[in-house]
Image (cartoon, rainbow, N blue to C red):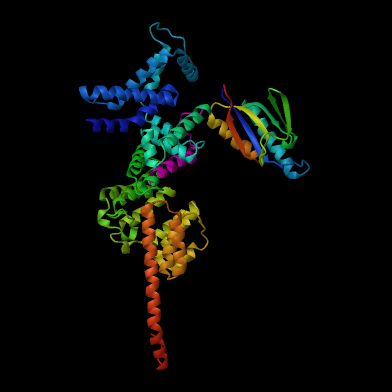
Amino acid sequence: MTDTLDCVFRREAGRCTATLIRVLGDIDLAEEAVAEAFLIAAEQWPKRGIPPNPGGWLTTTARNRAIDRLRRESTRVERYIAAHQMHTQDTNPDATPEREALDRFVDVVPDDQLRLMFLCCHPALAADSQVALTLRLLGGLETSEIATAFLLPEATIAQRLVRAKRKLRDNHAPYRVPGAAELPDRLHAVLASIYLIYTEGHTATAGPALSRGDLSTEAIRIGRILATLMPDEPEVVGLLALMLLSEARRSSRVDDHGSMVRLADQDRSRWNPSLIEEGHGLVQACLRRNQPGPFQIQAAIAAVHTDAPTAADTDWNQIVALYDQLQAIQPNPVVALNRAVAVGALDGPSAGLDALANVILEDYQPYHAARADLLTRAERIDEAIAAYDRAIELTANSAEGEFLSRQRQHALQLAATLTRNERERQPYKQHAQERGRPCP
Amino acid sequence: MPQYLLSVWHDEDYVVDFSTAEAQDRVAQVGAFNDELQRSGAWVFAAGLHPASSATVVRSAADGVSMTDGPYAETKEQMGGFWIIEAVDLDVALELAARGAAASGGPIEVRPLQG
């Protein structure tokens, strides 16, 4: 029962909060009202059963609580009425203006969740505040849960949330879905924030475990809501597809000892076929629209990877072509780095290193890790070791650190083998030359 | 309606030589932006400031008043001018700030007024 309640709460919290913010015109009041409604539900539902429309029940209860409260604190009603420019003249003497106005306002509108998404990811907020606010208000996570997920003290997250909410209030940030002209920019901020939550869950930036599944699951859940609300935005669909296709491979990214496994070495039978199928379906739908964007192209790249039954079957030609396309619309060093890795797989390590020549990402661990791998394969071991050392120095995630140390060890073994071969070849070479025959 | 302070920031050593064509161009652009603010009703007040070196800081203490030469914060960037505007919400204020930044050529800090 408790589990079911938790599930219902988690699912309904965002929707309920979204509507109550519009009704009450204040984030804190909405959060309090929703929390109160959840308390009542936790008390009543185990006895009477979950109502047929739990979301509607919670929203109505929260609204009624809020109205009672607003009436008790009449100054707030006045402020509220003024804020919404409601009519105070009324022909029905029994009707109270605030009750009527609230009734009109309280219908659950799907747009409320969109409004909330755009509010949480307002460009006036820093990225880490956007992420915390999205998880708290839209995801319905407790402050302590967000803190645990990001391995930060609860007080840090609490302060971040308080500041963000205060900033939005003091600045009179509007509760609306941006108009067509601003939509691309504003939507990009929302997508970037959701993706940041996903990647933080996918590769934790610090700590022992490589994946913190809760955040990834949350990001996908929010991504699904957004895709339901904006089915005609190809980048929204593209982001969902990208997350699903990455998620499909998650269990194979770490071995039984918790160490990282490279894409090429992953056990593909452990990939999740239903997520792959869903992701491929979404990528296909995006391709048909023919309005490519960064998330759609990255999803398409993930689709090519998940299409290959073995690593050797990977269509690197297509992947390099997709990176070329991505680089054209979103030129940045990280894209160039990923492209260079693909070129290295297609045309060999020297070509990969050439593609990397103009990329400089001094403080970016994946840059040094990728360079180290290409250098090892190009048999430039001394440079490879230096690159591994720098990558290990930059990683805060112990699973990644272990993986890199193992790779560094392999590079050293390769160096030993190369030297040994060299030494063994040397006398033979001399011998061969003495006998006037060409070297093999 | 909410009001916002839009302040323009420049390097401390920022000196405008109004004889150059570039400065004249800026003046024209800021003038056009001011006209636009007045036409749309967003305009409350605006002014450009003399260089930060012209500032004096005055402090009141129990034993009297003290004065120090120069701006309050000795930072590399100083406020060069400001607008007070009226806007229905933050998004409108930010949109106006973007146009102000383009006209003035400096970054603009948007800050809501209390009340």
| Numbered marks: total | 0
Residue furthest out toward the bottom: A435
- Is residue A270 depicted above or below A180 in this figure? below
Rendering coords of residue A165 (x, y %):
47, 30
How far across and down, in percent of the image, does residue A301 sit?
A: 38, 54
| Vertical relation: A59 (above or below) A391 | above
Residue A24 seen? yes
Q: Is residue A175 magenta?
A: yes
Image spot of residue A80 (x, y percent): 46, 18
Task: Tell me which residue sits at (45%, 37%) in the image.
Answer: A130
Q: Give A265 or A296, whichever is nearer the viewer.
A: A265
Q: Is residue A226 visible?
A: no
Judged left or right of residue A309, residue A396 is right
Q: Nearer the viewer, residue A408 or A61?
A: A408
Would you say A149 lies left or right of A330 here? left
Assess whether residue B83 is covered by the magenta stretch: no
Report the residue that reaches farthest toward the right: B19
The residue drawn where x is 25% and y is 22% is A44
Specify the segment rendered in magenta: A172-198
Q: Nearer the viewer, residue A13 or A285?
A: A13
Q: In the rendered view of the protein, which quadrant contains the C terminus of chain A?
A: bottom left
Q: Position of residue A379 (x, y in %)?
A: 42, 71
- Residue A232 sits in which quadrant? top left
Q: Quadrant of the N terminus of chain A?
A: top left
Residue A120 lies in quadrant: top left
Q: Residue at x 51, y 63 (%)?
A: A357
Residue at the location (32% across, 44% down)?
Answer: A213
Considering every residue shown, the one lying at the far top of the view is A93
